[in-house]
Image (tube, rainbow, N blue to C red):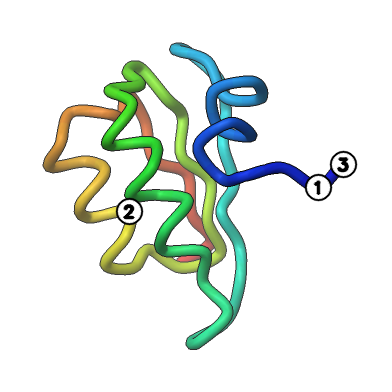
Amino acid sequence: MIAPLDEAIAELVHDGDTVALEGFTHLIPVEAGHEIIRQGLRDLTLVRMTPDIVYDRMIGAGCARKLVFSW
């Protein structure tokens, strides 16, 4: 499926979901994280190989209930 980011997040991510926004350095989907914040999603379990700035922002914005990471 190819869709605008705001529509894709609205359709596929819901309060309480487990979300993994994966990528390495320049491939981290930062704008997807920002869209999750903008839409006010809450109680997410965030999964990531290593925490980064976008997850820090999502936690600070109140989106996260739990963080799971490998380190």
Marks 2 and 3: which is nearer the front? 3
User: Crowding at label 3, few (<14), some or many (≥20) Cα neighbours within 10 Å?
Assistant: few
Q: Amino acid at mark 2?
A: Tyr
62 left or right, relative to 33: left
User: Crowding at label 2, few (<14), some or many (≥20) Cα neighbours within 10 Å?
Assistant: many
Q: Which numbered tag is attached to residue 1?
A: 3
Instruction: Answer above or below: position of 29 versus 55.
Output: below
Residue beneath disc 2: 55
Whichever of labels 2 and 3 marks the residue nearer the N terminus, that label is: 3
25 left or right, relative to 51: right
Whichever of labels 1 and 2 marks the residue nearer the N terminus, that label is: 1
Image quadrant holding the C terminus, namely bottom left
Residue beneath disc 1: 2
Kind of element beneath mark 3 = loop
Residue under the image location 50 percent in, 37 percent down? 6
Task: Check the image and name the residue furthest to the bottom.
Answer: 26
Kind of element beneath mark 1 = loop
Q: Amino acid at mark 3?
A: Met
Q: Position of residue 52 (x, y in %)?
A: 33, 68
Task: Check the image and name the residue furthest to the right.
Answer: 1
Mark 1 touches mark 3? (CB < 8 Å)? yes
Kind of element beneath mark 2 = helix
Q: Determine the image quadrant of residue 13.
A: top right
Mark 2 touches mark 3? (CB < 8 Å)? no
